[in-house]
Image: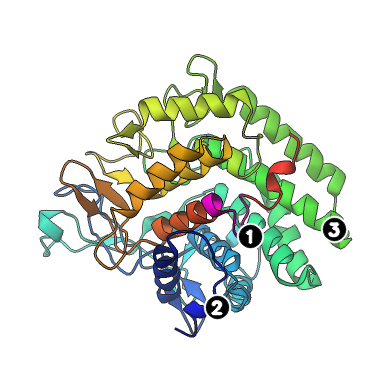
Amino acid sequence: MDWTGKHTYQGRHREMVERSLITLKALTYAPTGGIIAAPTTSLPEDIGGVRNWDYRYCWLRDSTLTLLALMNSGYHEEARDWMNWLRRTVAGNPDQAQIMYGVAGERLLAEWEIDALPGYENSRPVRIGNAAAGQLQLDTYGELLDTFFWTYRSLTREFRAAEFALLRAMVKHLESIWQLPDEGIWEVRGGAKHFTYSKVMAWVAFDRAIRIAEKCGFQAPIRRWKKTRDAIHRQVCEKGFSKRLNSFVQHYGAKHLDASALLLAVVGFLPPDDPRILGTVTAIEKYLMQDGLVMRYETSKTSDGLRGSEGKFLACSFWMVCCLKLIGRHAEAEKLFERLLLLANDVGLLAEEYDTKRRRQVGNFPQAFSHISLLAAAYSLSHTGQDRHTAGVLNHKA
């Protein structure tokens, strides 16, 4: 009660918000401040299928989003602990940074399979470790720099020289790699591509670095950073948007969609009333929504290196709530949010996905990403707190 009593949320569904905050707190390893994605391994995304992963690690992406959710709720001590964990974990050259670590900063997360185990409801293989640790995921830089920016705004409004040195080193490394293909936010195993969302988040990284440097007065190549930021923006609008579909697509040259495009307006890449954003929302509703929930992508059209299908990705459905709110479709956003809350179990916990045919949760459980996105949607609908959906990011004029 002492901890939950400190949060600042005053909107509706306070009980579910508290439940999600408690879940994120429980997923935090107190000795180091590391935040795991889920406490389970190999709970299947497709019952009887092969989409089974070990999530007992600290993804930088998930950790930064958890941090933002906690800061939005007034928990600044956790933010400071996480910043200390980050400095320790990625100390050294940014080109040696991984997208995920163990709770104590372990880097060796080799993936292997336990053939002797039958798996949950005969879902094989059972995996230990996660080979995604060796992937390039450009969006991680955007999430990190976005968190730096909001940590700066929410905590002290000052940056220490050591923190800015880390930021500058990350941006310098990103300058040399942002044009490379990567495995993207969904960690595909079908080969690297120029994922649209990855490039957008590279844009976010430069945008937030520029803002911090200008506000703090640190020496930085701001003119060069602005040139790169603008070049990324032009490239995404030229290569990541399909006029035929009237939507941003999964990767450059693709003819199919990805739910991560819902975040383009949320992070300020384009204003929410831009026709390309409105077209993207309409296209995702048409092609990626089934049974009222959002798929992250169509597995039949995406070369993710795996067979089989998966459930509806709960985080993506919460992103749709945020996006509908931003574009002025408030009643629809509220209705979808109410539906999503009903999918939680009897103690308010959410897995990674929901199988609408079996009417059950699937994937690792409880899943930080789902609860993070629930919190973002709740704050967006309530106008409470200085979360990044309402605190001025969208004022950037692209």
Gap in angstroms between the C-alphas marked 3 and 1: 16 Å
Instruction: Identify the mark at residue 215; answer none if there is no mark.
Output: 3
Return the x and y of residue 392 as percentages of the image width and height: 71, 49
Three-letter amino acid code at disc 1? Thr
Which element is circle 2 on?
helix
Q: Which mark is residue 147?
A: 1
Please report whichever mark, 3 or 1, sits nearer to the chain's N-terminal start: 1
Residue type beneath disc 2: Lys
Numbered range of the magenta stretch: 380-389
- Mark 2 is surrounded, within 10 Å at the Cα level, by few (under 14), some (14 to 19) or many (20 or more) other residues, namely few
Q: Is residue 269 left or right of residue 339?
A: right
Quadrant position of residue 91: bottom right
Mark 1 or 2 closer to N-term? Answer: 2
At a point 45% along the width and 69% down the height, the residue shown is 21
Decide if residue 187 is in sight here: no
Measured Cα–Cα span from mark 1 to mark 2: 21 Å
